[in-house]
Amino acid sequence: MKKKSILSILIIFLVLVGLNYLHIKSDEISLATSSGEASVVLFRKPFSSYSNRIEIETSGDVYRKDFKGKNPFNIWKLEVGDVEGDGEMELVLGVYKKSPHHKVMAKRVFLYNIVDGSLKPKFRASRLSLPMDDFILYDIDKDGRDEIVSIEIKDKSYFIAAYHYENFHLTRDYVSKPLVMKPSFAGDGKVMYDGRTFNLNIREKEIELK
């Protein structure tokens, strides 16, 4: 009986050790880079909601980066777009972590380029104007650049805001009026709000749901 108990404990231990090294694919996206087409894959550990491993494959070569240690990235979203309108696609990660200038756990956006098959940091936002709930990349003003369009929260009200990236800085150029219910992105520049689907539009500096 004692041997069976020891064997059971050993099996459980080995399973737990194995799970610690197991990674599950959580998201995948492709984009054109200066080095050719790149496939970007995120991996998470079992029972985790966040990804902390990224693999980039270009021309048969695989680059792997693990975001671990005391302050992991905790990636919850992966987006691709052209934030400068120069034809070079950026990889934008939604992360949940502390930052050097904002030492609380919060959702943030980190921008990268892929250069020679590896990640090159472009801009890592400490925070947006208001606490962020979600974001997409979308050219809301049709200027040829993808804006970071975010859903933000303040005093139990929700706002939709759009930021331009320029010269290592994010500028909030457009924002909606306060929304009493939580909106959600529905793809292709659309938002679900109060059970209906709306298009994102701008009028001067205001984001409107049409």
Image: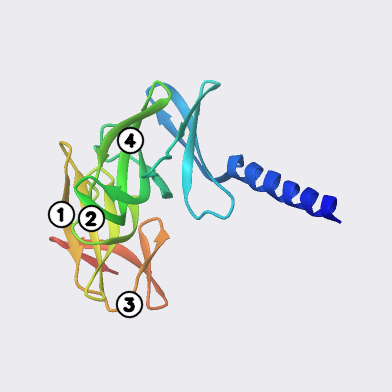
- Residue 79 vs residue 30: left or right? left
Mark 2, residues whose alpha carbon is within 10 Å: few (<14), some, or many (≥20)? Answer: many
- Residue 113 vs residue 168: left or right? right
**Residue under numbered circle 2:** 162
For badge 4, the amino acid type reads Tyr
Rendered position, 176 above or below 174: below
Answer with mark 1 or mark 3, whichever residue precedes in sequence. 1
Mark 4, residues whose alpha carbon is within 10 Å: few (<14), some, or many (≥20)? Answer: some
The CA span between labels 4 and 3 is 32 Å
Q: Which mark is residue 181?
A: 3
Say which element carries label 1: strand
Answer with mark 2 or mark 3, whichever residue precedes in sequence. 2
Give the farthest residue toward the front: 2
The CA span between labels 2 and 4 is 19 Å
For badge 1, the amino acid type reads Asp
Q: Position of residue 50 (x, y in %)?
A: 47, 51
For badge 3, the amino acid type reads Met
Residue found at x 30% / y 40%: 111
Residue found at x 83% / y 54%: 2
**Residue under numbered circle 1:** 173
Would you say the residues marked 2 and 4 are in contact, meaning their CB atoms lie under 8 Å apart?
no
Answer with mark 4 or mark 3, whichever residue precedes in sequence. 4
Q: Position of residue 22 (x, y in %)?
A: 61, 42
Would you say the residues marked 1 and 2 are in contact, meaning their CB atoms lie under 8 Å apart?
yes
